[in-house]
Image (cartoon, coloured by chain):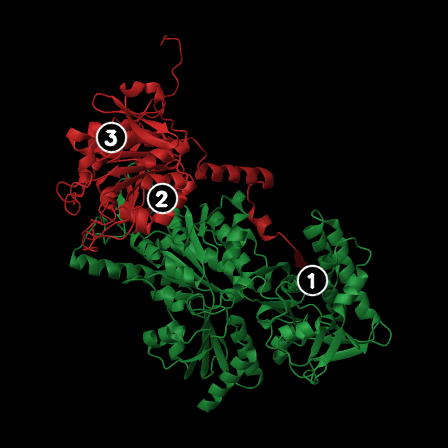
Chain colours: A red, B green
Amino acid sequence: MSPTTPTPPAAPALPAYTKKDFQSDQEIRWCPGCGDYAILNAVQQVMPTLGIPREKFVFVSGIGCSSRFPYYMNAYGFHTIHGRALAVATGIKLAKPDLQVWVVTGDGDGLSIGGNHMIHALRRNVDLKILLFNNRIYGLTKGQYSPTSELGKINKSAPFGTLEQPINPISLALASEATFIGRSVDIYPRHLMELLRRVSAHKGAAFVEIFQNCNVFNDKAFAAMTEKDVRDERNIQLEHGKPLVFGKNRDRGIRLNGLKPQVVKLGENGVTEKDLLIHDEHDVALAYLLSRIGHPEFPLPIGVFRAEKLPTLEERNRQQMDQVRAKLGEGDLERLLNAGDAWDVK
Amino acid sequence: MTTETQSAVAGRLREVLDCVTIRFAGDSGDGIQITGQQFTTTTAIFGNDLATFPDFPAEIRAPAGTLAGVSGFQIQFSNRDIHTPGDRPDVLVAFNPAALMANIKDVPPNGVVIVNTDSFGEVDLRKAQCTSNPLEDGTLSAYNVFKVPITQLTLKALEPVPISHKEKERCKNFFALGVLYWLYNRPMEPTLKWFQQKFGKKDPKLVEANTLALKAGVGYAEATELFRSQYDVPPAAYAPGRYRNVMGNEALALGLVAAGKLCGLPVFYGSYPITPASDVLHELSRHKNFGVTTFQAEDEIAAVTAAIGASYAGALGVTGTSGPGVALKSEAINLAVMVELPLIICDVQRGGPSTGLPTKTEQADLLQALFGRNSESPVCVLAPATPSDCFHIAIEAARIATKYMCPVFILSDGYLANGAEPWRIPKVADLPRFEVKFRTTPDCFYPYLRDERTLARPWATPGTPGLEHRIGGLEKSHIHGNVNYDAENHDFMCRLRAAKIQRIVQDVPDLEVNGDEDADVLVIGWGSPYGSIMAACQEARRKGTKVAQAHLRYLNPLPANTGKVVARYKKVLVPELNLGQLLMVLRSKYLVPARGLNKVQGKPFKVSELADAIMQEAKNLS
């Protein structure tokens, strides 16, 4: 910068945050070995890098193991009631749109007791960062089946096996019109942090399913897909604009056979990358198709299924208020009270 | 009192009356409510005091012509101060046999009954379960019956208007209104103006049709020799000022808007549609230019929790519902109790339990508001006494909620919600202004460090640098607010939360006693029966019984002198539209042998039944 150029008034410099700045003084009370620690760690590492003042962060949760999360974050935190975090967060966001509101929930809190709020928070496109810790079990109540538990699973409340078809969180989020949908795994810290950064940048309802191991009540629920030695072969990383290739040697891919996805080997039967599906974060139909595939017939898709920029509820709310103000003028109480058929008594 | 003079119209008497009660009754699709509202507006502008009672079925269009589908609208208007819509109608306007049969028992002998003879065919009679025609079988022999072919006359008057037969028929309510305007000497202008506003842009033909129908009604009444008299009810003596009609739900919504303005907070109203509270949502959603956010939630729970979230972020969080919705919101209200955030819960009570009587009134949610949550859950509870009082109670609720950082219930009900009365419009400058303080500085900040006088904790909203903290539904430690399961701490915190609500009493005016100071009988009530109780006490006094009267607008905490007041009288009567809820509170709190006057019929008290009961109690004493 030349010495003659006037220096623009600098925005108050953001403190140089470190992970420590986002750690609260509360003793963490998750079971040793719980996947929640890894997620907390990832979030606390990402927060300082987002360029957002700490006081703008609000963590809202419901009830369950995952919902203790806000206590451990040095930010604003609201540990609400079972299933209702999204509704509380919606109120926060409508009242103060400049806050960055994160909702931490689980498969029970977010898909069972709070399932209705999930659908509606997503379809309204409230700018919420929703982290759904999916461990496919109820942990805090000690081992009952959850809405994502596999059919036939044996557990404390279903000693002869569950009778219920589990819900597919990603499909549900798509059907609910979520504008951002992603999936990661507690033990993929780098992948998870990258996803969290994208979540933070997204304006609108962002839904992230995080596979999270409950080592006490549902240990190794995801091990077959996520253990170090198998994950390359059994995961597929979704990348916008790129073909769906996976495998340690990146020698396999997914193509469409009619309307059905199919795993193919590159180089076999003349298959090349050109034959593969190209991931497109704006294609809802493709996202739905990808939400339906997974282990063991297919690799498990991780990454971003959908990312679409659409107006948020709070933006629309502000806009409508401005429009009404432009039309009717700023609210005048005296005039309001005297509106309609009023008459004078002398 | 009636004075008779010769009318301007040849051969007609002109009588002056103090007070008249009219009931319109017909199918729920007959436009009964609109007719009643038009009569109300006109009568208010004319200058009478008035009170109304709309009474309609829960079904939007119940099977036409059946008893289940009868919709009614009653208005009492007077040249003096009145408090109720009247016990029994002096005039019943019945649009069909079902409306006649459902209402005739309420009309006193010699009362006026105006019927639409065009809807007394065989089918109409069968639908109303009449085995014979009540117009001919002597059912109406005790009444002063006017048989008017309202439908035919309306159709005839509307011949020149190019609209369908069905549309013409639908104007018949305004023909009937015209008849009543002539009978009670009311101006047509307010209704003519309303036709313009309502239909002018949409369909000028409907303005013409309805205008013709109304004028034809007036003309018919004047020309026919059916009516012997025309009646005047002179204007009441009002205090000078500007007036308007207001219904309870409307007043409640305006009060919330005003509250937001008066304390400088944006109002957030989370609600799920429910009868009879929905009109509060409708009204508030029109006032976005006041910075009001209305949020029609996916359910009752989301409605209240979103309001709590908004309140946490520094808005005036309000949720509105009726009794069944309160049941669903209970857990969330307890969250507000625990995290000590301002929250206003408007409960427009209706008949219950369960779905109960959705469109009928009742005041049986008092104990639900006071105690209907798990564990020790103290909240503030207020109750408006009249439709216009809903306005002032809303402001008071906001003032208390923000000052004491607590949930405040407003117990309105179906009767207040839909009932109208003239309201002297307050000057904004005269309304109470109240300051809301947010915590902004980090020195010595603790989320649960309390104000010494109010015991309120600081309101520290997200976005404030240096005040990052965590709150939640788990028990917390005194001052620091950290999660704490310690036995003594929990005991302490439960008592502290209760003490905080009790502290509100310093903001509650003493209970006033009206009437005979030296009476042996005190009648103490709360909520919507105020008008009936007031009129009943006046009636009893007129008949020589001494009676004192007090009315509670603050149910928790009760005014500081309540115990002294109720202990002062030999007999304490508690009229309530429930089976004895305030009664239970007063008896347990003050150990007084109070007695209840209770009914749960989905209807307000009649003045006469209360007056009789009061006089009987007084007699039993002597």
Regarding residue B255, the answer to whether it shows in the image is yes
Disc 3 or 2, which lies upstream in sequence?
2
Work out how far the residue at label 2 is from the one at label 1, CA to CA, in angstroms: 47 Å
SS category of the residue bearing label 1? helix
Q: Amino acid at mark 2?
A: Ala
Image quarter hosting the C terminus of chain A: bottom right
Q: Amino acid at mark 1?
A: Thr
Q: What residue does disc 1 label?
A: B42
Q: What residue does disc 2 label?
A: A89
Eyeballing the image, is B271 above or below B573?
A: above
Residue A233 at what x, y percent from top left?
21, 28
Front label number (3 vs 2): 3
Image quarter hosting the N terminus of chain A: top left
Q: What residue does disc 3 label?
A: A235
> Which numbered marker is on residue A129?
none
Residue B159 at what x, y percent from top left?
81, 58
Residue located 32% across and 19% down the image? A273
Front label number (3 vs 1): 3
Work out how far the residue at label 3 is from the one at label 2, CA to CA, in angstroms: 33 Å
